[in-house]
Image: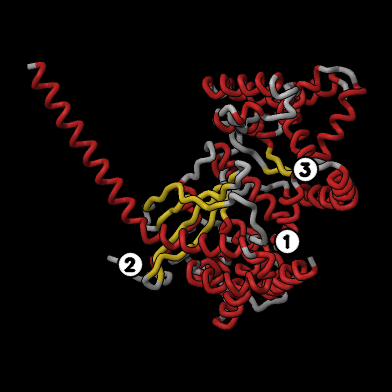
Amino acid sequence: MPKDVLRAIAVLMILVLPGCATMNDQQTNGTYDPLQPMNRAFYHFNSEANRWVMTPVSNAYMAVTPRPVRGSLTNFFDNVSYPNVILNDFLQGRVVQGASDIGRFVVNSTLGMLGFFDVAGRLGLKSHTEDAGLTLARWGVPRGPYLVLPFIGPDTMRNTPDIALSVFTNVLYYVGNPIVTVPLSIISVINTRANATNEIEYVRRNAVDPYVFTRDAYLQHRNYLIHGKHLGLSSVEKLMLPPGMPVPAPAKPRTDPPLKLPRPWPGRAAIRRPPVPGE
Amino acid sequence: MGWWRKAGSAVVLTGMLVMASVGVAVAQSGTAPAVAVITKFQGTLLSVMRHAKTLGLSGRYRQLAPAVRKSHNLAFIAEVTLGPYWSGLTATQRAEFEKVFTRLTIATYASEFDGYSAGQAFHVTGSRVLGNGDVLVATELVSAKGGQASLDYLLAPSGGNWQIVNIVANGVSDLALKRAQYTAIVRAHGFPVLVKKLRAMVAQLMVSHKAA
């Protein structure tokens, strides 16, 4: 992709971003999905593209590349994209983590032979997950609507600047020789898809509504990352005490017996809650 | 005067440390029965994983069924997953939903925990009592290669025992995912369609693994 186009995308993302800031708190928490019709269309498109194109390609790739080779390629692609993590460490003021990540990048790029081997991990320099979306979240920028982007998948408005930033901070962007970068980029996409096989299969087997499953799992996991992989107890308690749960929209014509209007949630105590053992 | 101040500070600090450690001990002893439920359940799960191939899917289902029924409050979870729609169901519909939900839960465990890699183990990493009296038990599933997945269990008292009412894997709540999907389907298509889909899913889980 020409650099000018990428710059234009980056500028566009920055212009779009202030729009997110106008979202209210209710829209930034829970599942805010006002673009659902468009998202579902793109979800269907991605599912079909995955089914007919990416799955056969990924299966063929896994058949010809032994697991250790795929592991080394994953290490390599993680390493060339790692400057994005370092940049976001410092944008969030995480100086110690940033220093550790610089060390990780240097060690893997040299001793780890361009990153094919995770030598730094064995030295205790652990990998971190940071991106522009997490940085903006920690700066207090509201999440904005949930998005499903063609070929990319689940995302949110707040995360979109990372699409451009991750390109600019990728080492391959500065190699400048398409003979090298184009095949590597293609392998990177196929390798990423192959690594996601288990997750995709899990959704296929276990989701009653794959769109809702993917959306909610994605948003919950992003929230978990925003809080530094710390499970917010208040959010857990909120899940178990749903008095504020929004009343469903008026039901469409259906085939089942009409449901009564939802009554107020009785609270946990009212539901089969005998005394605590030992009390 | 300075000496007295230092001595006084030391006494206060020691007292605070003692009180804090007593508090931690009390909190941990309060969660011990709930932690025991998780340890026992994960022990069963690990045993099933170790013998997954010889047991086969139906064998795993049979071994896990009593452990899942005992350690999970499936009736409560089923109720919460339907949110406000639960109150509109008849007693027969509720029983029907609980039955299919229970089968789905056991079938999911039996189909997903279908193998064991050397070094895989569950570890309890912490526990605490929440504001509403429930207990959160944090665990992780580690592999010999260093990979790990966080599994947090929320337990509530029921029938004289502690039972699991929610599982959060890497920050993703199983209960919230199910509730979002089930209520969306009931809202759009109605309760019978949801039950039909869940039955088909149970059948698919069992058949696909038999074929494999």
| Cα distance between the residues tagged 3 and 2 | 49 Å
Q: Residues within 10 Å of mark 3 (few under 14, many from 20)?
A: few
Q: Quadrant location of residue B161?
A: bottom left
* 2 or 1: tag closer to the N-terminus: 1
Q: Chain of mark 3?
A: A
Q: Nearer the viewer, residue B86 or A101?
A: A101
Tell me: residue B178, above or below residue A59.
below
| Count of labels in the image | 3
Q: Amino acid at mark 2?
A: Pro
Q: Residue at x 63, y 47 (%)?
A: A32
Quarter of the image where the N terminus of chain B is located: top left
Q: Nearer the viewer, residue B130 or A262?
A: B130
Nearest to viewer (mark 3 / mark 1): 3
Q: Residue at x 59, y 21 (%)?
A: A91
Q: Quadrant location of residue A146?
A: top right
SS for callout 1: helix
A46 on left or right of B198: right
| Cα distance between the residues tagged 3 and 1 | 24 Å
Which residue in the protein does label 3 denote? A67
Return the x and y of residue A214 as percentages of the image width and height: 69, 51
Which residue in the protein does label 2 denote? A277
Q: Amino acid at mark 1?
A: Arg
Which residue in the protein does label 1 denote? A205
Q: Residue at x 88, y 43 (%)?
A: A64
Tell me: residue B133, above or below residue B101.
above
Disc 3 + disc 2, Cβ < 8 Å: no
Return the x and y of residue B123 as percentages of the image width and height: 49, 50
Quarter of the image where the C terminus of chain B is located: bottom right
Return the x and y of residue A83 as percentages of the image width and height: 68, 22
